[in-house]
Image (cartoon, rainbow, N blue to C red):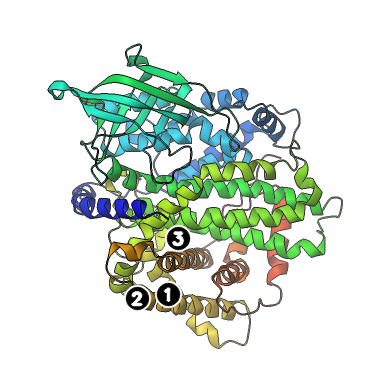
Amino acid sequence: MTKELIHATMATLTETQNQTQTLTGRAAGTTAAPARDAEHDAALARAGQLDALLGAPLDPANPHGLAALIAADARREPPAATEQLLTETGLGAEFVPAEFGGRLTRADLLAKVLRPVFRRDVALGFGYGITSLFGTAAVWAAGTERQRADTAALLLGGGRASIVHHEVAHANAILRDEFNAASAPGAAGYTLSGRKDVIMNADRSGAWVVWARTAPERGPRSHSVLLLRPDELPAGTVARLPRVPTPGMRGGLFSGLEFTGLPVPSSALVGRPGEGVALALRTFQVNRCLIPALAVSAADTVLHSAVRAVSPGRGGRTVRRWHKPLTGVFADLLACDSMATVALRSLSLLPERAHVLAAAVKYVVPDLLREDLEALASVLGSHGYEHGSPQYGSLDKLVRDLPVAGLGHTGTAACQAVIVPQLRSLAERSWFRAEEPPAELFSGGAALPSLDYRLLGIASGDDFLSASLIGSAARLADHRSAAGGDRAVLAELAETFVGELRGLRARCRRIPDGREALTDPAVVVLSDRYALLLAAAAVLGVWEAQHGADGADPFLADPAWAVLALTRLGRRMGIAVPELPDGVLDRVLRELVGRYEDGRSCDLDGLRLAH
């Protein structure tokens, strides 16, 4: 993590917290929390319909199957037939808030709808339209009524929007280079200049949402957001640069733009001048939660292929030596989905307090998934080299796509830049003091308010998920005296994580004053441990919600998966954890094999898939 990124983030947080809190209070007073059970069911229904339209992934004759998608990737082309299908189904409406005629009501429901796409191909999901959501988020948060209406019409009509990032220190190709917008004479707008070679969908988008530098100095007021329509720009001021070959996401998605003295009217400004960094910090929370949730579904496909590789013709039995890695990956996927889903739901339920959790999700989940892909590569063995195979080619493709989806090291550093400056404050003011969040946070079908980008806060409020960890441990405490058994071990694990939080609080309180301390590697390590503690809290919260719900999924209500997931998290942190009780691995393996045979997903929903 770079000093520049830490310092820039801190400055922006300081300047925008009061502004955001004022906006939050004003908007919250006029926002109702209608029942959402029907919306939850409707989202699952849309996901099922989309999955059926995309067809059986392993059917070699399916034009939208894995064979066709892998072949398009090898040709470095977008899968045109499948993108056309998604357009015909009106998938673009999922990225438009319901108040503007779309179907976007909550981020957790959006993830459910998009999972059939990402389960087949991460690059397809990014290339078709999720980057449109990332770009237009600033419009939904701060745009004028005209900007919102025009943007909604574009996406509802099957068009795309590109997000044009600003440059950050030590950036990768996507975050390298930026555009400069100088004030035009007479304050009539801006003059835009510069070149950026790697922008997703730049050559086929109907709108460009540009984070342009409008002040030469570094700081929280350095950038503004401009909404540009390519078909309205004067000739000779814009050059569309050729597509750029990239080692990951090879499907011909990236190209560039060069502006030469482009006149931009003041009506293109989104929000206020100099508000770009603040808008990024607020709206990127949704991206940071959504990408990991969708990456889980992509890893799910690889897990299915690994089970297939070690159980052909064995009547549902898998090779015994692979039981431990397979069940471990399954438990990790459930843990990742728990953390991502809780974060997505918090964007609706606790929008002013979700900022640090969103960064932690983006920090933890991609790393866990990378470890899991390495484990699955061992299980797949020689099958892992069948790169063009629909049965086994998903591993190679996801290994290439995942770093691009998560923005690699730069994405990790950006998340650390959010978490690290908050550690001392959380230790002094929140941990072991905050109240637990509402139970609806962990219950997948519970009613929630709609997602409102205008309500998203920046690093404010108490740490509700650490409070949930402490509450879960207290409720499980009575089981610790039991002689062995799953719940006794679960109770012991919960208390162990609470003890780790207590130790972390003591260490974070000793972080010295001054910005230089926040770039100390020893302080950064504390953010690693804290993020994993939040993952543990999410697992316990989701298990409790399933255990206490009427008609809950019997497997998710069973402590076995939570015990295994928490044990693996604890070992990653290097803390002592109890031995797994007898039968835990067997029960988790039985569920995994059952889901594989029934064609069900290996996430919290466990939905039946086209196969």
Residue 140 vs 459, above or below: the answer is above
What residue do we see at 43% from left, 31% from top?
93
What residue would you read off at disc 2?
432
Q: Is residue 341 visible?
A: no
Which circle, 1 or 3, is nearer the viewer?
1
Classify residue 420 as left or right of residue 191.
Answer: right
Residue 228 vs 282, above or below: the answer is above
- Residue 432 x %, y %: 34, 76
Q: Mark 2–mark 1 contact, CB under 8 Å?
A: yes
Q: Earlier in the sequence, mark 1 or mark 3?
A: 3
What residue do we see at 58% from left, 86% from top?
482
Q: Mark 1–mark 3 contact, CB under 8 Å?
A: no
Residue 47 location, quadrant: top right
Label 3: few (<14), some (14–19) or many (≥20) C-alpha neighbours in 10 Å: many
What residue do we see at 62% from left, 31% from top?
53
Residue type, mark 3 in image: Phe
What residue would you read off at disc 3?
442
